[in-house]
Image (cartoon, rainbow, N blue to C red):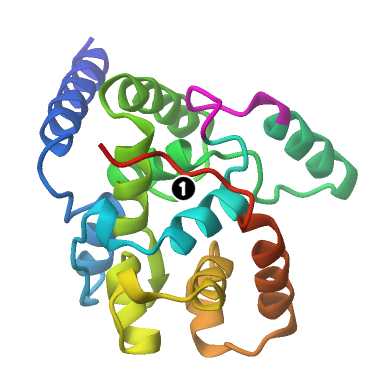
Amino acid sequence: MPILAIIVFFNVMVAALLGIGKVVPVTESAFMMTHRLSGGTVTQRWVGYDDIAKSAKQAAIASEDSTFNKHNGFDFQSMEDAIRRNEATGRISRGGSTISQQLAKNLFLTSHRSYIRKAEEAVIVVMMESIWDKKRILEVYLNVVEFGEGIYGIEAAAQHYYGKSAKNLSNEQSALLISMLPNPKYFQKNQNAKRLRKKQRIILRRMQGVRIPRSA
C-alpha cells in the first residue's frame, strides 16, 4: 500500500507540474537535476516558441518524430519497427520513442531502462498530451533536451556552438544540432564525425516538407 500511495502522489505531482508548465517557462528537468547532483553545471535559457528558428522545429520533427502532428503521444508503428530491429540484432537500440515520450522521460524520470519506468512514462505521456498542445510539447522539448555536457535547450546550444540565438539558426545549423541527439556528449567532441554529417544531410532533405504546430 505505501508503494501505491507513492505512485499516486508522484502522478498527482506530475499533473500539477504539467499544469504549471502550461503557462510558465520550464527551466528544470530530472536530467538537469541528475547532472547537478553528479557535480556538473547546467547551462539552460528558456526561449519562447517564436524565438526558436522554424528550421530547428522542423529538424526535430523530421529526425525524432515524423508523425508528431498526428499521434496522441505514441507511434505504435515505430514501436513495432523498433522491436523487430531489436530482435534482428539481438540488442536493444534506441527507436520508437516519440518526442512526447522523450520529454516525459527527460522531465520526470531517469535514463534507466525498465518496464516500470516505461509504464510510468506512458502515464505521463497521456497526461502531457491531455494538458499541453503540440506546440507546447515541442517548445518545452527544445528547451530542455541535452546538446552536450551540461548544455540543455536549443538556446544554450545555439550560443555554445554558433555564438548566436536559437532564433537565428540556419537550416544547416539546426539540422546539425538535432543530429547530435541522442548522443550529444560524444558528438560535442566529434563535430566532424561521418555519422553526424550523414544524419545532418538526411535531416536537411526531410525537414523542408515538415509542418510545425502553429503559434497561437
At horizontal 34% and vertical 67% (from top left) the residue drawn is: 154
Tell me the quarter of the image containing the N terminus: top left
Prevailing secondary structure of the magenta residues:
loop
Question: Mark 1 falls on what kind of element?
Answer: loop
Picture coordinates of residue 166, whole percent (x, y): 32, 71
Picture coordinates of residue 49, whole percent (x, y): 28, 52
Q: Amino acid at mark 1?
A: His
Q: Which residue is mark 1?
A: 112
Q: Indicate whether 113 appears above or below 27.
A: above
At horizontal 32% and vertical 62% (from top left) the residue drawn is: 52
Picture coordinates of residue 195, whole percent (x, y): 72, 76
Q: Indicate whether 183 appears above or below 62.
A: below
Picture coordinates of residue 91, whole percent (x, y): 77, 49
Tally of numbered discs: 1
Q: Is residue 130 magenta?
A: no
Q: Which residue is at the front of the view, 154 or 167?
A: 167
Query: Residue 98 sits in which quadrant?
Result: top right
Query: Residue 200 sits in which quadrant?
Result: bottom right
Tell me the quarter of the image containing the C terminus: top left
Q: Which residue is at the front of the view, 84 or 140?
A: 140
**Magenta residues?**
69-77
Is residue 163 something one can see in this rendering? yes
At horizontal 20% and vertical 31% (from top left) the residue drawn is: 18
Is residue 150 something one can see in this rendering? no
Q: Residues within 10 Å of mark 1 (few under 14, many from 20)?
A: few
- In the displayed structure, does residue 88 sit left or right of residue 21? right
**Hey, which residue is sitting farthest right in the picture?**
88
Q: Is residue 74 magenta?
A: yes
At horizontal 45% and vertical 25% (from top left) the residue drawn is: 122
